[in-house]
Amino acid sequence: MSSKPCRSKAFAFALIAVVVMGVSAVAATVPASAVVAKPAPVLTISNASPRVGEVVTLSNTGTCPFGNCNDNLKWFPVPMAGSHFGTQIATVRGPATAVPYSWSSPGNKQIILTSNDGQSRLCCSGTASIVITVLPSLTPPPPPPPPPTPLPATTPDAPTMNAAAPGDGYAFVSFSAPSSDGRSPITGYTVTASPGGATATGTSTVLTVTGLTNGTTYTFTVHATNAVGNSGESAASNPVTPASVPGAPTIGSATAGGASATVSFTAPSSNGGNAITGYTVTASPGGATASAAASPITVKSLSGGVAYTFTVHATNAAGNSAESAPSNAVTPTAFPTASIFNANATETNGLSTLLFTVSLSAPATEAVTVRYATANSTATAPADYIATSGTLTFAVGEQTKAIPVTIVGDTVHELAERFFVNLISASGATIVDSKANGNITDDDPA
């Protein structure tokens, strides 16, 4: 830093004033004729790397030759990027030179010390500066606030019942976990049957209650358990009736028919705790079956001349029983064949009846039904005949039936005409000739 000479007419007093921490200096006088350069201030700091909040001492260690100076020694913090002084830290007078200071943020900092006595005495004069680095504070952050005091645990909410399904002496019960565990983990569930009070426990949400009586209807509730205790019971489940499959029926006898056999049997002694809903008879060989609610059952569509035996099983809600023992062997006769024959009529001037004969190859050994219907050809309905359809039924022992068709006569000369009668389907017989012609001859003169 620069210094300048002291100018005075008589005596020049130089006042070097640095007052810090309450210490004052004593002034001294020198002859005015003495010409001595004013020394520059020298700025020092007690710690060049202080931390945020740490108080350091700023000092002027420059030497003023005389006391009692009126110098103003001023410390300024200066922004590093700025070109102007900041807010003045302190002004001191006298020989004491220490000033305490601290910073509130870390980083590089600059401090400037200026001295100007404004007098003709020899004192410190000029400017000194220093750059320091302020480090972050070592003071640890305050601890986080303590967590809120937890609410005390309670028993869980009740589970939600889903459904129950029956088995053989047991039931599956499905439910959903409760919406709240009462702030304590759920350790298990207990399902209770009603009536009887049979229970099942576990951690799964599907539990199996055993020891139930087949044929008895039950409902179920469930509760959850945690360390505090048990929840309330859930709503009741749907009712279920445990059951097993029935026992096997006792086979009776088989009787052959036309391409069929009738099988008798006795119901099993046990229905498995659930009502039997039906029976099924199975033929061997071939596997043809027939089902009904009770004995006897007729199995149809068997081959004539083939020996068959039969078994039967019962069915309830739990499933099918085992098969019975086989029946006696029987040999069904073949179905008789069914045929329809052509019919001829001479047209009259009014209505007449034309009969079509349907015959079986052998008398019926069981009821035989045959469906039929007329169809147009050169003769058309209703101008030439009345269309008709229906079913013929052959009782046991019958072999021939007739289909009547009404012929419509007129007085107009016509060529010979015809229509058809078709056999559509049969039960208990096999159709071999399915179409017959109805031939109409005109009786009117040309």
Image: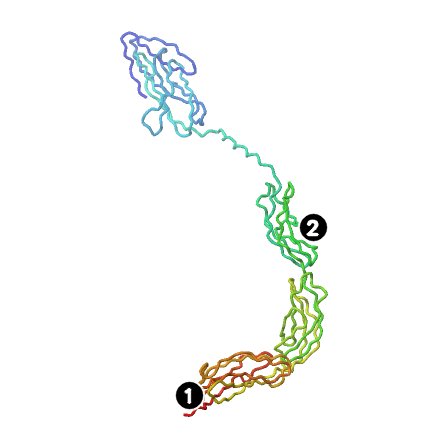
In-image side of 26 versus 423 (left or right): left
Q: Which residue is mark 2?
A: 197
Q: Residue furthest bottom?
A: 445
| Vertical arrangement, residue 286 with respect to residue 127, above or below | below
Quadrant including the C terminus: bottom left
Checking the image for residue 331, the label placed there is none
Say which of marks 1 and 2 sits in front.
Answer: 1
Mark 2 residue type: Gly
Residue 431 % position (x, y): 56, 82
Label 1: few (<14), some or many (≥20) within 10 Å? few
Checking the image for residue 412, the label placed there is 1
| Vertical arrangement, residue 414 with respect to residue 59, above or below | below
| Vertical arrangement, residue 276 with respect to residue 123, above or below | below
Residue 271 % position (x, y): 69, 63
Marker count (numbered): 2
- Mark 1 element type: loop
Pick the residue in front: 13 or 86. Answer: 86
Residue 393, image quadrant: bottom right
Give the Cα distance between marks 1 and 2.
93 Å
Pick the residue in front: 98 or 400. Answer: 400
Mark 1 residue type: Val
- Mark 2 element type: loop
Pick the residue in front: 54 or 385. Answer: 385
Residue 356, image quadrant: bottom right
